[in-house]
Image: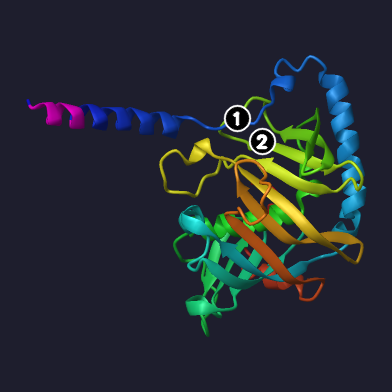
């Protein structure tokens, strides 16, 4: 066997092992300060107290007083990573999305491009589509990206309301980023240590406003068809908050690869809202199949 062939074989073997390792490895956001969880009771109480302040600052009770909400937004996926990770057929898409709070019942209408007028939706995690001038059909192949996108957009819009009910909440310390001081709260389910069934979150709570400016998160339910995607995590930056009937809506939601970035333009994905409103349509619109049993916010 020639030296060149040996090098090729060895290189392929190394790459194979590397890809296998990448497939098995999932990032763990658990900070060293919480390993062993020696001050669990104190950290839990402090973490919960901080999330309660954030609940009030964000106006979660005001959101929960409404039956439905909707927003129109432009969703942009940027660069090579954004192209691979994008949820919709186009890297830049304008859409209207309707939701029932504290559920995963949603309906999205594409407002531009080749998909203009098409509707996709979730009812108790049952996926459906409605072509232009057509009828809603549940008898379609599940689109994992569409399902993930609708659920994720809702989850982050309702973030503090969702995470405040997490099984495991721990204050993890303080940090400073871009000159702003933050409390950090670690949130997950099952066990503090990373595992495949539940995501982990690190919440950056602004010490002045009690608002969430950033949240880092794992992506255990991975829709990305690429080796090693479990090694990465994301950070959502929230900005341009606007008070809509007492609820603070982040009109700009920016996703960075791994941790937050000094340069706001160094993003993978950005959702920019153009409008947001409560109770502008009948809740029945999001329950087209009356025979499907409601599941609320269960995954």
Left or right: residue 215 versus residue 279 is: left
Left or right: residue 197 versus residue 169 is: left
Q: Residue 200: which disc?
A: 2
Q: Residue 244 at x, y = what percent? A: 87, 66
Question: Could you tell me which residue is drawn at 46 percent across and 65 percent down?
Answer: 140
Q: Residue 172 at x, y = what percent? A: 79, 28
- Residue at the disc numbered 1: 28
The quarter of the picture where residue 292 lies is: bottom right
Q: Nearer the viewer, residue 49 or 108?
A: 49
Residue 102 visible in image = no
Circle 2 Cα neighbour tier, 10 Å, few/some/many (<14 / 14–19 / ≥20): many
**What secondary structure characterizes most of the magenta part?**
helix
Q: Provide the secondary structure element on which disc 2 rests.
A: loop
Q: Residue 293 at x, y = what percent? A: 66, 57
Image height of 277 relative to 15, above or below: below
Image height of 206 relative to 187, above or below: below
Bounds of the magenta span?
2-8
Question: Could you tell me which residue is drawn at 75 percent across and 18 percent down?
Answer: 37
Question: Could you tell me which residue is drawn at 50 percent across and 49 percent down?
Answer: 223
Quadrant containing the N terminus in the rendered view: top left
Question: Closer to the N terminus: mark 1 or mark 2?
Answer: 1
Q: Provide the secondary structure element on which disc 1 rests.
A: loop
User: Mark 1 near mark 2, Cβ–Cβ under 8 Å?
Assistant: yes
The quarter of the picture where residue 28 lies is: top right
The quarter of the picture where residue 169 lies is: top right
Q: Residue 266 at x, y = what percent? A: 61, 53
Query: Any magenta on residue 291?
Result: no
Left or right: residue 230 versus residue 54 is: left
Q: CA distance from mark 1 to mark 2?
A: 8 Å
């Amino acid at each position: 066997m020639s030296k060149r062939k040996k090098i090729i074989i060895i290189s392929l073997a190394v790459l194979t092992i590397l890809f296998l390792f990448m497939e098995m490895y999932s990032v763990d956001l658990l900070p060293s300060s919480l390993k062993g969880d020696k001050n669990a009771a104190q950290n839990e109480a402090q973490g919960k107290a901080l999330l309660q302040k954030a609940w009030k600052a964000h106006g979660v009770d005001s959101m929960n007083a409404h039956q439905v909400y909707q927003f129109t937004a432009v969703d942009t996926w940027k660069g090579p990573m954004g192209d691979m990770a994008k949820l919709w057929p186009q890297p830049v898409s304008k859409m209207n999305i309707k939701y029932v709070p504290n559920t995963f019942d949603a309906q999205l209408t594409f407002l531009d491009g080749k998909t203009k007028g098409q509707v996709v939706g979730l009812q108790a995690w049952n996926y459906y589509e409605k072509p232009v001038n057509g009828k809603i059909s549940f008898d379609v192949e599940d689109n994992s990206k569409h399902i993930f996108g609708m659920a994720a957009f809702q989850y982050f819009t309702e973030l503090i309301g969702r995470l405040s009910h997490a099984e495991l909440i721990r204050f993890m310390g303080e940090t400073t980023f871009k000159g702003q001081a933050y409390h950090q709260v670690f949130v997950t389910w099952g066990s503090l240590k990373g595992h495949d069934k539940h995501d982990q979150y690190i919440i950056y709570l602004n010490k002045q406003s009690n608002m969430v400016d950033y949240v880092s998160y794992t992506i255990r339910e991975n829709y990305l068809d690429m080796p090693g995607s479990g090694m990465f995590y994301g950070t959502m930056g929230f900005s341009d908050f606007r008070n809509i009937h007492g609820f603070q809506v982040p009109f700009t939601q920016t996703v960075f690869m791994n941790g937050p970035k000094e340069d706001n333009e160094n993003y993978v994905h950005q959702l920019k809202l153009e409008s947001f409103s409560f109770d502008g349509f009948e809740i029945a619109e999001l329950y087209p199949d009356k025979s499907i049993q409601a599941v609320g916010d269960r995954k």
